[in-house]
């Protein structure tokens, strides 16, 4: 448990849009992954080195393979992205970064945002995004969809992720 005066800093790492948008321009994909890894490591180390007390929570990168927009990306001939393996590589480096020598006594934790999203969308429609322009539309149909557009999870998914994060923080 942490004192009320302690800081709580939550960093959601980025890099997903760079992986998706830059693939057509990059011939050596490892350069992109290395640059993303370096940016994440610099941000995390910057936090660790400047925050004296409190808890630092790092959220890992999400894999968008279930998003309706990812299917469109594949349909447009971008099936060579290997997005899941790149994200897995980045996330594994992030796990290793949490075990930095000299900072073992610090309250630095990794929240598995990717796992939380996978759990939250289980059983929901991930093939298409929600739209009000459907036959037989009812207000409850919105709860059947994981995404409100091609890439972004619905409010219900955000709520489920928030519940998991609260539980994660309570268990610290």
Image: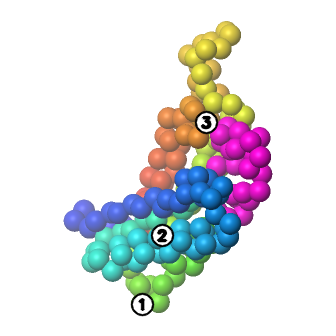
The residue beneath circle 1 is 102
Q: Residue at x 68, y 31 (%)?
A: 128
Q: CA distance from mark 2 to mark 3?
A: 25 Å
Q: Are marks 2 and 3 in contact (CB under 8 Å)?
A: no
Nearer to us in this view, 66 or 33 = 33
The answer to which of marks 2 and 1 sits earlier in the sequence is 2
Q: Is residue 145 above or below residue 162?
A: above
**Span of residues in magenta:** 64-88
Circle nearer the viewer, 3 or 1:
3
Image position of 79 (left or right of 98): right
Q: Residue furthest bottom?
A: 102
Q: Residue at x 39, y 68 (%)?
A: 56
Q: Is residue 172 above or below residue 48?
A: above
The answer to which of marks 2 and 3 sits earlier in the sequence is 2
> Where's residue 34, x and y in %?
58, 74
> Where's residue 135, x and y in %?
68, 10
């Amino acid at each position: 448990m942490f004192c009320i005066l302690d800081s709580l800093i939550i960093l959601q790492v980025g890099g997903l849009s760079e992986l998706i948008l830059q693939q057509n321009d990059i011939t050596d994909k490892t350069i992109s992954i290395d640059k993303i890894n370096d940016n994440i490591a610099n941000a995390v180390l910057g936090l660790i080195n400047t925050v004296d007390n409190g808890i630092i929570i790092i959220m890992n990168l999400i894999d968008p393979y279930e998003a309706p927009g990812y299917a469109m990306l594949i349909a447009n001939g971008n099936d060579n992205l290997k997005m899941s393996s790149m994200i897995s590589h980045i996330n594994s480096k992030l796990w290793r970064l949490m075990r930095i020598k000299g900072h073992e006594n610090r309250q630095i934790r990794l929240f598995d945002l990717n796992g939380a999203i996978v759990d939250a969308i289980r059983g929901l429609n991930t093939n298409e995004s929600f739209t009000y322009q459907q036959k037989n539309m009812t207000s409850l149909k919105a709860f059947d969809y994981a995404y409100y557009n091609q890439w972004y999870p619905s409010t219900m998914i955000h709520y489920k992720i928030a519940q998991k994060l609260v539980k994660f923080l309570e268990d610290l």
